[in-house]
Amino acid sequence: MSFFLGYFVWGLVLAVPLYWIGWRLRLARFVPVWLRPARSRPLQLPAQLDPLLIRGQRRFDQTGPRR
């Protein structure tokens, strides 16, 4: 287990600065469009569900059960 944690920590130590440098220098603009992840559009809910959802969480009545 300590063997795994050692490699995991070193992976983070190396990956975070490399990611930050790539983000700071905007290196993603050199990646071809077909390699980039597809952007997902926001989910459009039916009008009937608008009163039930707030930021993706269900709203419960004061008398309703909470789980």
Image: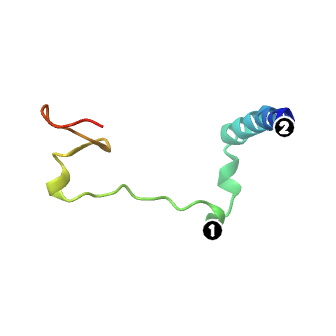
Query: Residue 8 location in percent, x, y?
Result: 79, 37
Q: SS of the residue at dot 1?
A: helix
Q: Which residue is mark 2?
A: 7
Residue at image position (66%, 64%) is: 35
Which amino acid does the dot numbered 1 rest on? Trp
Which amino acid does the dot numbered 2 rest on? Tyr
Q: Is residue 31 above or below residue 50?
A: below
Query: Marks 2 and 1: in contact by CB < 8 Å?
Result: no
Name the side, left or right, on which 39 lies relative to 34. Answer: left
Residue at image position (73%, 35%) is: 16
Location of residue 15 by image quarter: top right
| Viewer-nearest residue: 45 or 58 | 58
| Viewer-nearest residue: 50 or 20 | 50
Query: Residue 43 location in percent, x, y?
Result: 34, 57
Q: Quadrant of the N terminus?
A: top right
- Per the model, the C-alpha gap separating discs 1 and 2 is 32 Å
Q: SS of the residue at dot 2?
A: helix
Mark 1, residues whose alpha carbon is within 10 Å: few (<14), some, or many (≥20)? few
Q: Which residue is mark 1?
A: 34
Query: Residue 39 location in percent, x, y?
Result: 49, 58
Quick one: label 1 or label 2, which is nearer the N terminus?
Answer: 2
Mark 2, residues whose alpha carbon is within 10 Å: few (<14), some, or many (≥20)? few
Name the side, left or right, on which 40 lies relative to 67. Answer: right
Marks 1, 2: nearer the viewer: 2
Name the side, left or right, on which 9 lies relative to 61. Answer: right
Location of residue 7 by image quarter: top right
Name the side, left or right, on which 23 lies relative to 2. Answer: left
The residue furthest bottom is 34
Residue at image position (84%, 32%) is: 2
